[in-house]
Image: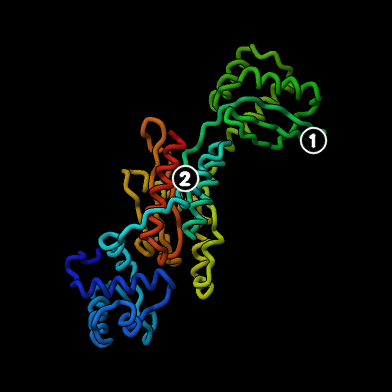
Amino acid sequence: MAPPPVAELTERARDIFRVVVDSYVANGSPVGSKTIAQLSGLSLSPASIRGVMQQLEEAGLIASPHTSAGRLPTDRGLRLFVDGMMQALEPSAQERAAIESRAGGGGPVEEALAATTAALSGLSACAGLVMVPKREVKLRSIGFVPLSADQAMAVLVSEDGSVENRVIALPGGMTSSALVEAGNYMSATLGGLTLAEARLRVDRELADGHAALDGAARTLVERGLAVWSEDGARRPVLIVRGQGRLIDAAAAADLERVRDLLDDLDGKQEIAALLDSARAGDATRIFIGAENEMFALSGSSVIARPFRGAGGRVVGVVGVIGPTRLNYARVVPMVDFTAATLARLMG
């Protein structure tokens, strides 16, 4: 059920509701009528405030976690606040510089994405998330380093300078000269190709008898490409940084919720699917608590925004995950700025 429109609340109700939300965001604790009377600046008695709080509770916007406790905003109430009452706080010059410096650090794209996500995590006090499509690695060179009689380290260098190593089994009778022969052939023939293109070329040349390789080297070339092709199909598309920031002083009192949240992060496929749903359009998506079945137990929220690359095509989604009491007014603009920064990086 959707929350009532903000216009249906009286000005007094909006003021009191805002205090409840602000207090929840600040310390995660329920707030009572006496505290609201002190914080709100309203010339209202605690009894009058309790009457308004009763109305807010009946509307499903606040609730009491215990019989005698104060009130907390519900997920429904947070949705009303985010959609209709929140006053965004733009990132400071220092925060913008911190994000931009990590995105502009150079090196492989994945490292820049991970570094930028780590910066967003640190500034937002949430776990940072970035999802990118499976990248088509273009080869620069491939070499093989013998480890034992039956194993070698395959070293792939891509055009962007990233290096990946894989241990592969050697066919029987493999000599050190065959390792060199296979590496030279792959570097000379396959440079500038993606893994898929390299597989097709090798298959074609071997079938046509154009590849001047002996049997052992041919097998090694096929195995070297196969291990990366299989890896690429499973290549992680989700980068998570700063999970430890989710365990703060308030969370320590609710360790079960924290465990559920960390379990959510371990299920990367489900998180990736959620972020993928934010790819459509240009707007920031905010998923609050039990609005999404995945977070029904952990009481978490996700703020996510797509970013575009060359040609204006959406190439990824960046965001944060944290408890529902995160500071939406501060974090939403921070995610927006990070998405714009990554768009410049990918453009």
Q: CA distance from mark 2 to mark 1?
A: 35 Å
Instruction: Give the residue number, with chain letter if any, for mark 2.
Output: 131
Tell me where residue 290 sits by quadrant: bottom left
Relative to the observer, which residue lies in front, 76 or 183?
Answer: 76
Tell me where residue 231 sits by quadrant: top right
Badge 2 vs badge 1, beta-carbon distance below 8 Å? no
Q: x, y (%) of residue 200?
A: 55, 22
Q: x, y (%) of residue 120?
A: 48, 52
Q: Which quadrant would the N terminus be assigned to in this image?
A: bottom left
Instruction: Give the residue number, with chain letter if any, for mark 1.
Output: 147
The residue sitting at 58% across, 23% down in the picture is 198
Q: Earlier in the sequence, mark 2 or mark 1?
A: 2
Residue 58 can be seen in this image: yes
For disc 2, the neighbor class at 10 Å (few under 14, some 14 to 19, many from 20) is: many
Q: Amino acid at mark 2?
A: Met
Please tell me how many numbered marks the rendered image carries.
2
Q: Amino acid at mark 1?
A: Leu
Q: Which quadrant would the C terminus be assigned to in this image?
A: top left
The residue sitting at 49% across, 72% down in the picture is 250
Tell me where residue 64 sits by quadrant: bottom left
- Does 101 appear above or below 285? above
Residue 84 relative to residue 194: left or right: left
Residue 232 relative to residue 301: left or right: right
- Does 180 appear above or below 296? above
Rendered image: mark on residue 205: none
